[in-house]
Image (cartoon, grey):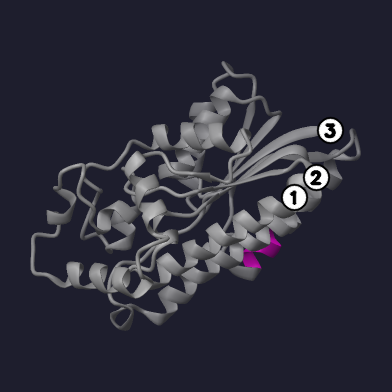
């Protein structure tokens, strides 16, 4: 049986870093990296297929958003399994990383409804569907990692839908972990705060190219993989993130949403909340 690792949203940021670390540090027969940007995937696959790590990295250009995307993924997975069964015993998904997703920044009333619905489709529907489709191929000791966010712990003004989608991912992952534990399948929710990726650029429609002071993705990914294989249900790299997650139990939801909304309405330089001391907390911690 061929052991496969599957990474969605693999063309940049955390997904790209997951691809690199999984290729170099873990033992799989094949690694499927999935995203929409063909050129980026090809570049990553070429770099990783260097013959040094004895793995085959397959770039899979595919839009997996929503029900149609999940069905597209299912057809691809089933066809590859059927093809392999002609010569051996099929596919085992040893590692599934649901990293595809995006966020939009700004008041809900001023943001495109279509864009918000697209976010729900990718961040929630796709994650749920991919897990369901992959489940028959998961065996004992398989691992699922779903990328949530520090925003999953508290509602955020100006990030209303994004925070809600990530709260869903966290809740779904914790419940799924409990359901699959007896089968020996581990599920971990990655809950990063500010990381140096393209997220801020996409969320702000280009207003912010990066999160200043963000943690390097390689540190976040390495810790997440380690915790996931140990059977931990969540992964939060920074101590400050863990404190925020803990304190969220005692902070009123409305109070948090009101504070973050008012904070981000203040006239200021767009990067002001990025230029802060490490002990302070701002909206960028949740990005």
- Relative horizontal placement of residue 30, taking residue 189 as reference (left or right): right
Any mark on residue 1, and which? 3
Q: Name the spot of residue 59 as percent of width and height, x first.
A: 58, 41
> In the image as oriented, which residue stretches furthest toward the left?
268
Pointer 3 or 2: first along the chain? 3
Any mark on residue 180, and which? 1
Residue 30: quarter of image: top right
Range of magenta residues: 68-72
Compared with 5, 162 (above or below) is: below
Say which element carries label 3: loop
Q: Give me the C-alpha separation between circle 3 and circle 1.
A: 21 Å
Q: Name the spot of residue 23 as percent of width and height, x first.
A: 57, 28
Q: Name the spot of residue 55 as percent of width and height, x first.
A: 64, 25
- Determine which residue is flagged by label 2: 183
Which residue occupies the foreground of this view, 43 or 164?
Answer: 164
Judged by depth in the image, the label closer to the viewer, 3 or 1, is 1
Please say if the residues under marks 2 and 1 sit with CB atoms less than 8 Å apart.
yes
Pointer 3 or 1: first along the chain? 3
Any mark on residue 45, and which? none
Q: Residues within 10 Å of mark 3 (few under 14, many from 20)?
A: few
Please say if the residues under marks 3 and 2 sit with CB atoms less than 8 Å apart.
no
- Relative horizontal placement of residue 159, taking residue 93 as reference (left or right): left
Residue drawn at 19 percent across, 68 percent down: 264
Say which element carries label 1: helix
Residue 153: quarter of image: bottom left
Residue drawn at 44 percent across, 60 percent down: 152
């Amino acid at each position: 049986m061929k052991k496969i690792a599957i990474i969605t949203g693999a063309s940049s940021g955390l997904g790209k870093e997951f691809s690199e670390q999984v290729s170099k540090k873990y033992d799989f027969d094949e690694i499927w990296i999935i995203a929409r940007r063909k050129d980026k995937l090809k570049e990553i696959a070429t770099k990783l297929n260097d013959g040094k790590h004895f793995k085959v990295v397959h770039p899979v250009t595919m839009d997996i958003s929503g029900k149609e995307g999940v069905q597209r993924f299912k057809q691809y997975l089933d066809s590859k399994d059927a093809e392999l069964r002609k010569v051996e015993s099929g596919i085992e998904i040893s590692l599934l990383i649901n990293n595809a997703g995006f966020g939009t920044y700004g008041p809900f009333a001023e943001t495109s409804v279509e864009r918000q619905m697209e976010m729900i489709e990718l961040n929630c529907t796709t994650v749920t569907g991919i897990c369901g489709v992959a489940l028959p191929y998961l065996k004992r000791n398989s691992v699922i990692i779903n990328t949530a966010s520090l925003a999953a712990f508290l509602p955020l003004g100006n990030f209303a839908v994004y925070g809600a989608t990530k709260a869903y991912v966290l809740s779904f992952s914790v419940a799924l972990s409990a359901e699959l534990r007896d089968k020996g399948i581990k599920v971990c929710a990655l809950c990063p705060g500010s990381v140096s990726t393209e997220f801020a650029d996409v969320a702000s429609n280009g207003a912010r190219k990066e999160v200043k002071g963000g943690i390097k993705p390689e540190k976040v990914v390495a810790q997440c993989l380690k915790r996931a294989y140990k059977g931990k249900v969540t992964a939060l790299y920074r101590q400050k993130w863990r404190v925020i997650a803990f304190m969220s139990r005692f902070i009123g939801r409305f109070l948090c949403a009101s504070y973050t909304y008012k904070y981000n309405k203040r006239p200021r330089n767009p990067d002001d909340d990025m230029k802060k001391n490490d002990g302070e907390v701002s909206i960028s911690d949740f990005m």
